[in-house]
Amino acid sequence: MCEAIDDTSENDVSKSTAFRVARLLYGGVIVFTAISGLRDIDAQAGYAESKGIPMPEESVVSSHGLLLLGGVGISIWRFPALAASSIVAFFAGVTPTIHDFWSHDGQERQNEKNHFLKNVALAGAALAFLGIGEKKN
């Protein structure tokens, strides 16, 4: 039988070792992804432009900036609701516009679908962090 956990108790999930490790792993991957995108703005902007994204260079910089802010915030657990919200915003904007697998065929369709599903999973994790982060305040 599963017992309900009182958020004010010593069993607060955000204070557990597993949660801290999860934050560092998730936040670290998000930070790495953001830095990787910012280090290759020309290629990222070219791909965004090929997908019809307006102001592709500015879009890449601002979206990866959101991702960087979110990853650092989750990792150090500062302003967690804001950090998680910025990650959700990144994935909500990028996933359906950049990974539009329904517009492709063959291997390209499969590649885009894999990226789309990966992003959905990462957005889901950000939503979980958002839920926990909202309770911190």
Image (cartoon, rainbow, N blue to C red):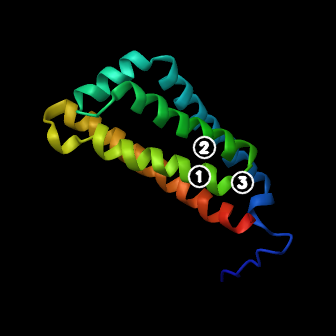
- In three-dimensional space, the C-alpha distance between marks 3 and 2, rounded to whole angstroms, equals 16 Å
Left or right of 35? Residue 92 is left
Q: Which residue is drawn at 67% across and 39% down?
A: 72
Q: Distance between the residues labelled 1 and 2?
A: 6 Å
User: Quick check: 95 above or below 1?
Assistant: above
The quadrant in which residue 42 appears is top left
Q: What residue type is labelled 3?
A: Phe
| Of pointers 3 and 1, the one earlier in the residue sequence | 3
Q: Are marks 1 and 2 in contact (CB under 8 Å)?
A: yes
Q: Which mark is residue 70?
A: 2
As drawn, is 47 to the left or to the right of 90? left
- Label 2 sits on a secondary structure element that is helix
Total numbered badges shown on the rendered structure: 3
Q: Quadrant of the N terminus?
A: bottom right
Determine contact: label 3, label 1, CB under 8 Å. Answer: no
Q: What is the crowding at mark 1: few (fewer than 14 residues within 10 Å), some, or many (at least 20)?
A: many
Residue 87: % across, % down:
53, 47
From the viewer's side, name the closer residue of 93 and 19: 93
Q: Mark 3 points at which residue?
A: 19
The mark lying in front, picked from 3 and 1, is 1
Q: What residue type is labelled 2?
A: Gly
Residue at figure coordinates x 49%, y 48% from the top left:
122
Q: Which of the labelled discs sits on residue 84, or is there none? A: 1
Above or below, comparing residue 56 to residue 93 in the picture: above
**Residue toward you, 3 or 75:** 75
Residue found at x 42% / y 28%: 58
Q: Where is residue 76 drawn, in percent x and y?
A: 75, 43
Give the structural element (helix, strand or loop) at label 1: helix
Q: Distance between the residues labelled 3 and 1?
A: 15 Å
